[in-house]
Image: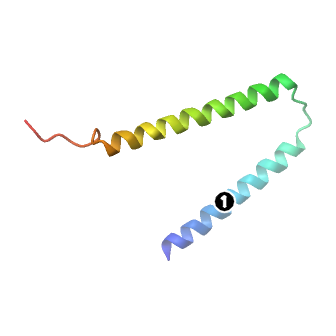
């Protein structure tokens, strides 16, 4: 029951954050040039690729025992 309640609260917070961000985005009276959109897309894409690569390394390290504690002396 606690897990369900936590999921509901976090889901509500996520929906609220998306709605507030969307409203603020629409309310801004600024233009982004073509170069700005390209920079935004490249930054988001590269950030995503770095995150995927790092998570892949974490899983690889965990699966191959590199994170295990060595008790030999």
Residue 30 x %, y %: 90, 32
Q: Is residue 8 left or right of residue 66?
A: right
Q: Is residue 30 left or right of residue 9?
A: right
Residue 25 x %, y %: 83, 43
Q: Can you name the residue that lies furthest to the left here?
A: 73
Q: Residue at x 77, y 48 (%)?
A: 21
Q: Residue 46 occupies which quadrant of the picture?
A: top right
Q: Residue 27 occupies which quadrant of the picture?
A: top right
Give whichever of 31, 43 is nearer the camera. Answer: 43
Q: How many marks?
A: 1
Residue 47 x %, y %: 61, 33
Q: Residue at x 81, y 29 (%)?
A: 37
Give whichever of 56, 30 is nearer the camera. Answer: 56
Name the residue tied to disc 1: 13
Q: Residue 69 occupies which quadrant of the picture?
A: top left
Residue 11 x %, y %: 64, 63
Rate crowding at label 1 as few (under 14), some (14 to 19) or many (20 or more) other CA atoms within 10 Å.
Answer: few
Q: Residue at x 30, y 41 (%)?
A: 64
Please identify the quadrant where the C terminus is shown: top left
Q: Residue at x 78, y 26 (%)?
A: 38
Q: Classify mark 1: helix, strand or loop.
A: helix
Q: Is residue 49 left or right of residue 66?
A: right
Q: Can you name the residue that lies furthest to the bottom here?
A: 1
């Amino acid at each position: 029951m606690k897990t369900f309640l936590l999921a509901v609260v976090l889901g509500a917070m996520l929906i609220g954050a998306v709605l507030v961000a969307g409203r603020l985005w629409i309310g801004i009276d600024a233009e982004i040039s073509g170069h700005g959109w390209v920079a935004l897309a490249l930054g988001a894409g590269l950030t995503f690729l770095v995150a995927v690569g790092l998570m892949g390394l974490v899983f690889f390290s965990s699966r191959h025992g590199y994170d295990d504690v060595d008790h030999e002396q």
